């Protein structure tokens, strides 16, 4: 099974504006925007300022994908540190192996776990300071 790799841009409340800008500049197809306020099963109160921020967005152009999100209000945001690399695959065992190898000597930012968008998702900053988002794709058997 193959791996898909895409740049992932994090912004601090300007994500929707950036998506519209890059959509136009790159002649890209907007694959959709999900907002924090749209998350299913959210049992915790959400600050009003968070609801319209972008949880996930994606553009596709020339066979490439560019993904985006805003930070959640109150989470740290460091200008210049807003780019990560997203890996996705249906091979969950391979995903686990890559995740653990990247975490060695690095920092786990989110343990591998099931989410509402992925059967297995985790985030790690490797020993070189590169942040990786690893996402399992649901098998469609």
Image (cartoon, rainbow, N blue to C red):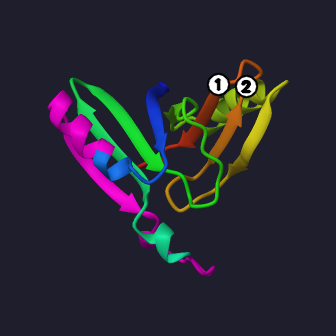
Q: Is residue 13 magenta?
A: no
Residue 41 lies in quadrant: bottom right
Q: Is residue 53 above or below residue 135?
A: below
Q: Is residue 37 left or right of residue 26?
A: right
Tell me which segment is drawn in magenta. 18-46
Q: Is residue 58 above or below residue 113?
A: above
Is disc 2 placed on a helix, strand or loop?
loop
Is disc 1 placed on a helix, strand or loop?
loop
- Picture coordinates of residue 1 (x, y %)? 49, 26
Of residue 75 and residue 128, the one placed in the foreground of this image is: 75
- Picture coordinates of residue 72 (x, y %)? 56, 58
Please give the count of numbered marks on the rendered protein: 2
- Picture coordinates of residue 113 (x, y %)? 68, 53
- Contact, CB < 8 Å: mark 2 with mark 1? yes
The Cα atoms of the two marked residues, 2 and 1, are separated by 5 Å
Q: Is residue 31 magenta?
A: yes
- Picture coordinates of residue 133 (x, y %)? 58, 37
Q: Residue at x 77, y 21 (%)?
A: 127
Q: Which mark is residue 130?
A: 1
Q: Residue at x 59, y 59 (%)?
A: 115
Q: Residue at x 39, y 50 (%)?
A: 14
Residue corresponding to mark 2: 126
Residue located farthest toward the top when viewing the structure as drawn: 128
């Amino acid at each position: 099974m193959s791996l898909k790799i895409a740049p992932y841009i994090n912004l601090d409340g300007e994500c929707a504006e950036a998506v519209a800008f890059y959509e136009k500049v790159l002649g890209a197809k907007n694959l959709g925007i999900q907002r924090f306020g749209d998350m299913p099963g959210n049992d915790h109160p959400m600050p009003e300022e968070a609801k319209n921020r972008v949880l996930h967005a994606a553009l596709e152009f020339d066979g490439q994908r560019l993904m985006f999100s805003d930070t959640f209000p109150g989470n740290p945001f460091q200008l210049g540190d807003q780019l990560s690399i997203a890996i996705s695959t249906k091979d969950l065992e391979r995903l686990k192996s890559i995740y653990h190898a990247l975490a060695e000597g690095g920092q786990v930012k989110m343990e591998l776990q099931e989410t509402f968008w992925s059967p297995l998702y985790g985030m790690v900053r490797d020993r070189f300071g590169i942040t990786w988002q690893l996402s399992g794709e649901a098998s469609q058997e």
